[in-house]
Image: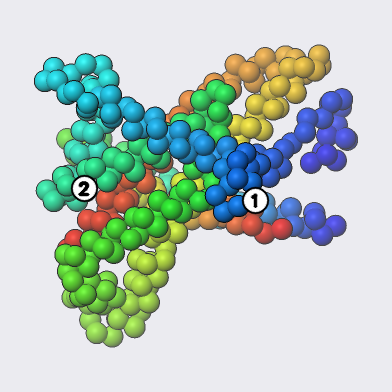
Amino acid sequence: MEGDIAAIGKGLVYGLGAIGPGIGIGFLVGKAIESMARQPEAAGMVRTTMFLGIAFVEALALFGFVLSFIIS
Amino acid sequence: MTSLFAANTIPAPFHVPSLDEMFNFPAIWFSGTFYAINRTVILTLFAVFLASMLFLIAFRAPKIVPGKVQAIAESIVEFIREGIAIQVIGHDGAKWVPFLTTIFMFVWVNNLFEIIPGINFPPTSRMALPAFLAGLTWLTFIGVGLKHQGPKYFLNVMFPPGVPKAIYLLVTPIEIVSTFIVRPLTLAVRLFANLLAGHIMLTIVFLAVNAFLINPKGFPVGIVALAAAPLLIGFELLVGVLQAYIFTILAAVYIGSSMHAEH
């Protein structure tokens, strides 16, 4: 029984941790594409900044992923 | 996991390997000592060998009209120089190209081992390697800050200039935690978790494809899955390059940010 609760907890930690970053990356990439379409000559700069932003946002989801292994 | 398959109609449940089986390899030499060498260590050393051989062969006798190997190595260096160092750090960035190229190549070759047939294990999915690289970056950007701003570097980080005095109550703890703790932690965890997830995914998918193929009932599903599996390899190829790129660009951002005080 306790193992089942732990399994549900693991799933919840990852699932809840992924909601925010998922929304965040969606906004981020959407806005980046919008600005690339408006100003194609700035595409290189926008792309670099977009990857940087993705890296920061994604870290939160990955913390959830790693924590789901740590809790037992 | 077993109960899931026992209740099902699949007659031969495949064994889902535990994390230990996937990531822990027994020591080959010097077992039991601090210097124990296992498969991960050998792969890491092999990555160093491959990356340094590429550049040694490419630049041992450089020509004005580059050959194939030299063209590849030159395009990598130019990508780091133009795309990362100069774009992120600025004109001072050119002298950081060797450091950034070393990090990029080392991480990239280690990531590539995830999908090379016969190796199929990324040493970067063990925390030791990303943690070491993140620690190295941490020491580097603190060292650069001390060199360019002197001991005032720590003051500039903790009390960013141009902020109203009362806000320091809020800003100072956040700045300390985010610069000296969260930066190296996220740098290491990002690389580690991406490769961990990728390796787990590939292992389980390939084992499942195999289990379907050897089972007459599951054979049609197995054929479809077998045809789709290369897509996953392509995805992991992309993730490997992207993570090496992101690690390098973040190292450049951190180094660049400690060169000049924020204002």
- For the residues labelled 2 and 1, the Cα–Cα distance comes to 39 Å
Q: Are marks 2 and 1 on the same chain?
A: yes
From the image, state whether disc 2 or disc 1 is nearer to you: 1
Using the image, determine if residue B244 lies above or below residue B254: above
Locate residue B192, reporting x and y percent: 50, 47
Q: Chain of mark 1?
A: B
Mark 2 / mark 1, whichever is N-terminal: 1
Locate residue B44, reporting x and y percent: 47, 39
Q: Which residue is disc 2 drawn over?
A: B96
Q: Secondary structure at mark 1?
A: loop
Q: Amino acid at mark 1?
A: Gly
Q: Amino acid at mark 2?
A: Trp
The residue under the point 67% across, 14% down is B223
Locate residue B139, reporting x and y percent: 33, 61
Quadrant, the C terminus of chain B: bottom left
Tell me if B46 is positioned left or right of B21 in this view: left
Dot 2 alpha-carbon crowd within 10 angstroms: few under 14, some 14 to 19, many 20 or more:
some
Q: Is residue B232 visible?
A: no
Q: Which residue is disc 1 drawn over?
A: B32
Using the image, determine if residue A33 lies above or below residue A13: above
Using the image, determine if residue B25 lies above or below residue B169: above
Q: Secondary structure at mark 2?
A: helix
B6 or B154: nearer the viewer? B154
Q: Chain of mark 2?
A: B
Residue A2: quadrant of the picture = bottom right
Residue A3: quadrant of the picture = bottom right
Mark 2 touching mark 1, by CB under 8 A?
no
